[in-house]
């Protein structure tokens, strides 16, 4: 179960990173975070291929890709409570380092 949660968070991160690269100016620290998550996802898929069926990984990855894209799009369009934005893209951009730590930590937990 932790494998699937980590996989979803990784897809969410990469969709957020894609939007961040298009909307904001990024520096080398952000690219380093992207590389760290990419290496972690490679290790995560290695675990998944060793322990789950390939077809289930493909289907779940497709579903997670779509759901993460819809979640980011919903935040971009805006979720408003009483006329004020509930959560904005700036808050998600500030959470990116924490998401990196979460993905790496859970990937390590999956492999242990």
Image (cartoon, grey):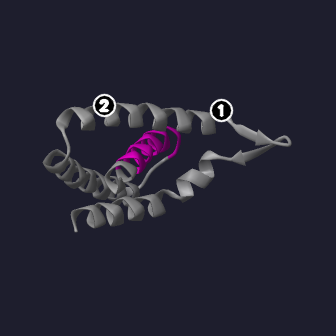
Determine which of the numbered discs, if any, sits on residue 77 in the image: 1
Residue 89 lies in the magenta stretch: no
Eye-nearest disc, 1 or 2: 2
Task: Classify mark 1: helix, strand or loop.
Answer: helix
Overall secondary structure of the magenta section: helix
User: Residue at coordinates 48% horizontally, 39% vertically from top-left?
Assistant: 19
Query: In the figure, 69 relative to 50: above or below?
Result: above
Q: Which mark is residue 92?
A: none
Image check: 32 left or right of 89? left
Q: Position of residue 60 (x, y in %)?
A: 33, 36
Q: Position of residue 103 (x, y in %)?
A: 37, 58
Q: How many marks?
A: 2
Residue 53 is situated, as x and y percent measured from the top left of the image, at 18, 39
- Name the residue: 53% across, 40% down: 23
Quarter assignment of residue 63:
top left
Looking at the image, residue 18 lies above or below residue 103: above
- Identify the element where label 2 is drawn: helix
54 lies left or right of 25: left
Q: Nearer the viewer, residue 61 or 73?
A: 61
- Say if mark 1 contacts mark 2, CB within 8 Å: no
Measure how far apart labels 1 and 2 are at the Cα level: 27 Å
Q: Which residues are magenta?
A: 7-24
Tell me the residue that label 2 is attached to.
Answer: 59
Q: Locate residue 28 relative to residue 45 in the image: left or right.
A: right
Point 21% across, 48% down: residue: 48
| Quadrant of the snapshot with the C terminus | bottom left
| Residue 22 falls inside the magenta stretch | yes
Q: Earlier in the sequence, mark 1 or mark 2?
A: 2
Q: Residue furthest right?
A: 82
């Amino acid at each position: 179960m932790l494998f699937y949660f980590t996989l979803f968070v990784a897809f969410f991160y990469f969709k957020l990173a894609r939007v961040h690269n298009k909307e904001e100016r990024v520096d080398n620290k952000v690219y380093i975070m992207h590389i760290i998550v990419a290496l972690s996802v490679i290790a995560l898929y290695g675990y998944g291929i060793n322990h789950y069926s390939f077809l289930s990984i493909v289907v779940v990855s497709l579903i997670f890709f779509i759901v993460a894209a819809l979640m980011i799009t919903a935040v971009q369009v805006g979720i408003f409570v009483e006329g004020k934005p509930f959560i904005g893209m700036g808050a998600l951009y500030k959470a990116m380092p924490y998401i990196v730590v979460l993905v790496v930590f859970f990937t390590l937990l999956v492999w242990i």
